Amino acid sequence: MVDVLYNASKKCGVCEGKVAVTKVRSRLSMLKQDSDFCTYYKEVNPNYYGIFVCPHCGYAAQDIYFEETPIAVPVIQKFLESRKVNVDFSGKRTLEQAIATYKLAIFFGEMASMLPSRLGGLYLKLAWIYREGERREEEMQALEHALQCYEQSFLKEKMPIGNMSELTVEYLCGELLRRTGKIDEALTYLGKVVANPNAKNEKRIYEMAREAWHSAREELKEQA
Ligand SMILES: [Zn+2]
């Protein structure tokens, strides 16, 4: 357990202070993956360490964006200026601490009008942590938020988004609709993915969409 975590030094994108962060080694043994891409590993849940928090100013962001200065930095600085910061998320994190770090990153992300896909990613990972803690109601709320963000990303962002193709985002929206009980809408989204001529080139997503479509059909029958 101990050896999968290591420390690194980063520069805070808001106050430029030096921050000692805890990271997870990239070589982990994958156990399984849920249909919304939540991945389980043998050694540790790397999502617990996906957010860096600055102990100097209190800013928090996803690891890969932590050193980037957000465009809204004056708004964030003004907010933090009057607050006394007392945060320490270094070292091993508990489920509760992991949740707290995502909430902080989402808070700053919303303040800084973060790209909807990035915000969606934060909500999705928060939902997965709630899932691990079997906190279903909170998981569903976070999935709803993630869904709204990804739907927004279709309107506001150019595809692909990071490593997610347009088809993947479409599939994910369909699957999140299904998971949050909006079966009719889920079927529309998933049906579009399955019928998309490009789906042939993305076999895995095509298969996942087909499976989710069938599950949604079954759930619809059960509801009737
Ligand atoms: Zn800082």
Image: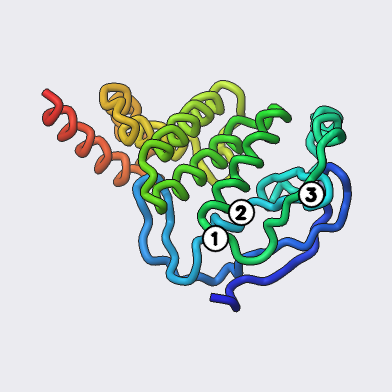
User: Which of 74/149 is in front?
Assistant: 74
Task: Report whether 26 appears left or right of 210.
Answer: right
Q: CA distance from mark 2 to mark 3?
A: 13 Å
Q: CA distance from mark 3 to mark 1?
A: 19 Å
The verdict on label 2 being within 8 Å of ligand 1 is no
* Of pointers 2 and 3, the one earlier in the residue sequence: 2
* Of pointers 3 and 1, the one earlier in the residue sequence: 1
Q: How many C-alpha atoms fall within 10 Å of the one at disc 1: few (<14), some, or many (≥20)?
A: some
Q: How many C-alpha atoms fall within 10 Å of the one at disc 3: few (<14), some, or many (≥20)?
A: some
Give the x, y percent position of residue 16: 88, 49
Task: Report whether 61 appears left or right of 37.
Answer: right
Q: Amino acid at mark 1?
A: Pro
> Residue at image x 68%, y 57%?
89
Q: Are marks 2 and 1 in contact (CB under 8 Å)?
A: yes
Q: How many marks?
A: 3
Q: Amino acid at mark 2?
A: Gly
Give the x, y percent position of residue 154: 53, 26
User: Residue 46: which numbered mark, if any?
Assistant: 1
